[in-house]
Amino acid sequence: MTGRVIAVGGHESDGAAALTGVLGPEVVRVAGGRELVREVRSARAGGERVCVVPMTLGRDPSLVADTARTLLALDASERAGTVLAEPFATTAHLVGWLRTLATRVPDDRALLVTAPSGDPFSDADLFRTARLVRQYGRHRTVEVALLGGDPGLAEGVRRCRALGAPRVVVLPAAWAVPEPTGVPHTEYGGPLLSGSAAAGVLASRVREAQDRYERSGDDGVARALAADHDHGHAHSHGPDGHDHDHGHSHSHGHSHSHSHGHSHGDSHDPGPDPGGDHHHRTPSHAPRSGAEPPVRHQGAAPDLVPSHRSPR
């Protein structure tokens, strides 16, 4: 199966704008919604098959679900031959890629894991990601900066300097992280992925989605609708109290409701690597440069157990 590949971007890529220098010209880049519908309809009208890839790096599960809901708006002829791929990456991939970048940074530098701010749960995931980069790396200081959020870039640099780092290296944890030109005491540790590495991951997602569709007719939409079900949190007031759902609460038309806890853990990583390995995995201790990080089965080594301490 060949056809048009459409990459859908969210806050991690500034609505797909930051993908321009990463993906080749053969890949259509859209922000979702009407842009996505227009591109799919155009391709299907010309007889092309379509593969849509949500370009999240694991911090934007709502992008996946929103993309699926958009595709549901297509008519039957447009949906036939249109497939939705697995997300470009998971947070486990992101941790591995950041650790690869960190291996190139001198030990006395501080690492500043940086991404555009999203919702509170996406931002909390970035702190968790930074904590894992520190846990399995050799740098004493690893802080977080949220572009357009708090702490911002200047505050992140200030914190690193206050902890004694002579220089601060910005590690991009999203597509839309510009080089910190003009910011004193900072260097740029990116890009997160080279163009060739990103192309390899994208090709893997497309190939797997197409193979699944041809084998079983599964277009990937139904599974993606549930991608953001755990993106939020709930708290209880005790057995005699009532629950408050924060984030997403779903009614299924029967007598009970579902509160979904935030569970984007490092222990379940369904995203395949470019080689097509479907095993669950977490980042290994020494990921390779320029490719997805090598991975092992969960429980293969003690360094795969995430820390439960609060992020720095």
Image (spheres, rainbow, N blue to C red):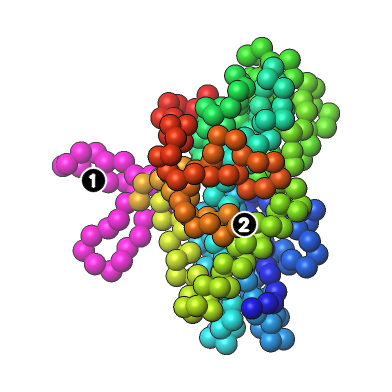
Q: For the view shown, which residue lies furthest in the left direction?
A: 240
Disc 1 versus disc 2: nearer the observer: 2
Q: Which residue lies at the image location 58% right of the left edge and 54% below the top edge?
A: 273
- Where is residue 37 drawn, in percent x and y? 63, 74
Q: What element carries label 2?
A: loop
Q: Which residue lies at the image location 52% right of the left edge and 72% below the top edge?
A: 212
Sort mark 2 into few (<14), some (14-19) or many (20+) by Cα contacts within 10 Å: some
- Where is residue 157 drawn, in percent x and y? 69, 23
Query: Any magenta on residue 247?
Result: yes
* Residue at the spot of label 2: 274
**Relative to residue 110, is residue 69 drawn left or right?**
left
Judging depth in this view, the residue of 210 and 128 nearest the camera is 210
Q: Which residue lies at the image location 68% right of the left edge and 51% below the top edge?
A: 13
- Where is residue 97 drawn, in percent x and y? 63, 41
Sort mark 1 into few (<14), some (14-19) or many (20+) by Cα contacts within 10 Å: few
Judging depth in this view, the residue of 249 and 97 nearest the camera is 97
Q: How many labels, in total?
A: 2
Task: Report the amino acid beneath label 2.
Answer: Pro
Picture quadrant where residue 102 is located: top right
Q: In this view, does 25 lie above or below 39?
A: above
Q: Which residue lies at the image location 53% right of the left edge and 24% below the top edge?
A: 312
**Magenta stretch?**
231-259
Query: Any magenta on residue 22?
Result: no
Task: Report the amino acid beneath label 1.
Answer: His
Q: Is residue 123 above or below residue 79?
A: above
Q: Residue 242, which numbered label?
A: 1
The answer to whether any part of residue 45 appears in the image is: no
